[in-house]
Amino acid sequence: MSPFNLQTCARPNILALEPYRCARDDYKDDGTNILLDANENAYGPPVPQSLASGSGSGSSGPELDLLGLHRYPDPHQRDLKQLLCNLRTTHAHTSKLLSPDNLCVGVGSDEAIDALLRCFCVPGRDRILVCPPTYGMYSVSAQVNDVGLVKIPLLPAPSFAVDVPRVLDALTNEPNIKIIYLCSPGNPTGSLLAKEDIRKMLEHPTWNGVVVVDEAYIDFAPDSASLAEWVNEWPNLVVMQTLSKAFGLAGIRLGVAFTSEPIARLLNNLKAPYNISSPTSAIASYALSEEGLKTMRKHKVKLIAQRERLVKELPTVEGVGKLAGGESSNFLLYEMLDKEGKPSNEVALKVYGKLAETKGVVVRFRGKEHGCLGCLRITVGTEEEVTRFLAALKEALREVRGK
Ligand SMILES: *Cc1c(COP(=O)(O)O)cnc(C)c1O
């Protein structure tokens, strides 16, 4: 039994928060009311002629005023949340059902990362635990909030698994750790974390804190890998997801936190009421419809085929070393080797520069990250992009390594 206690774990000012309410929380809009409660402009926005409805342009564009852009968006987004619940209810991890009350939606997962810090961590006192190499926003957001960091590195490549004994030990002995941020599949590791390892942290016998699992890349992992529905089995689990990656919607900024109802209530209380814009909500709802999911899965199959192609072809390229990490994401982490066959940051940095400056291909240098010596992180692109990348990489390595 976890000693998690929301009343002593969350910040007192957040627990005491009286959330912002609007008149439409009291009087549901049935579409027939005259809405004079929110100081909106009933004449609507300026929109390009070609996009305005009734402009005679036929069906050539979305009808922006159908989105009701002159109205504030829905602060609760229950329909959108229900679609997310439907997607993540797999019954692979529990027989319980996810409901919209388990969710908080935000401006990308970056908003959720920050909201959790503000919900649980007292600035200048509390800390978070992270496991490098990992996503950079956890520490950036911690610093913005004046929240300290405890770092327990992942085990070495290629497993990049959580060092469970060391993490449990830190949770026992280090004071004021409120949140663990885990990333599964990891960025930049591409490795899925073991469910049993996460369970051990959730079950820590003395630690009163929250385990956050960032599943930004979960749709590239095997089916049912998402632990989203597991939040109904644990009071202190948060699972974050985003439409920025597999759904191809980085531009609309939609992220989601699945968690227990009491934590979801706190997150919803503290967020800005109108954080999800109407266009974002409409586009996300389409993406999560039957039709939208079909397209997403079609694109995913293509990307996974290209990922497998890279795994097959990259080892045949002179100067490419081991795949460092896993194959559960839409990117791969590969070592670049010097002439002695050792992973080298010098080679990796030069290849990175050459690819971008002379061959028009931008990848990510990750060699400075813990346990990633000599590594480049390569996002899986379209078939044509992968073809161009492979040719460019061969040339760049030949030029850099002088053969
Ligand atoms: C890309 C990424 C995100 C996405 O953040 P958004 O704000 O939703 O775009 C979150 N976590 C990780 C680990 C990522 O790599």
Image (tube, rainbow, N blue to C red):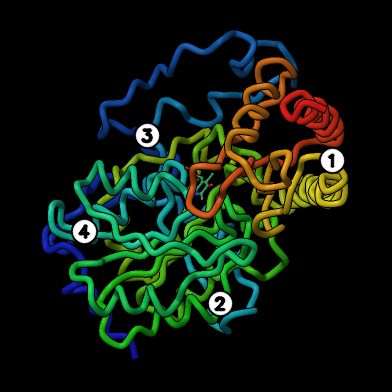
Q: Residue at x 27, y 32 (%)?
A: 38
> Who is closer to the viewer here, 364 or 280?
364
| SS at mark 4 in the image | loop
Q: Is residue 390 left or right of residue 197?
A: right
Q: Are marks 1 and 2 in contact (CB under 8 Å)?
A: no
| SS at mark 3 in the image | loop
Of circles 1 and 3, the one toward us is 1
Q: Which image quadrant is residue 51 in?
A: top right
Q: Residue 297: which numbered mark, if any?
A: none
Of circles 1 and 2, the one toward us is 1
Graded by Cα atoms within 10 Å as few (under 14), some (14 to 19) or many (20 or more), the crowding at tag 4 reads many
What distance separates the C-alpha of mark 2 from that of mark 4?
26 Å
In primary-sequence order, the first of circles 1 and 4 is 4
Q: Residue furthest top?
A: 49
In primary-sequence order, the first of circles 2 and 4 is 4
Q: Residue at x 73, y 46 (%)?
A: 341
What distance separates the C-alpha of mark 1 from that of mark 2?
35 Å
Identify which amino acid the numbered label 4 is placed on: Cys
Q: Are marks 3 and 2 in contact (CB under 8 Å)?
A: no
Mark 1 lies on residue: 317
Marker count (numbered): 4
Mark 4 lies on residue: 121
In primary-sequence order, the first of circles 3 and 2 is 3
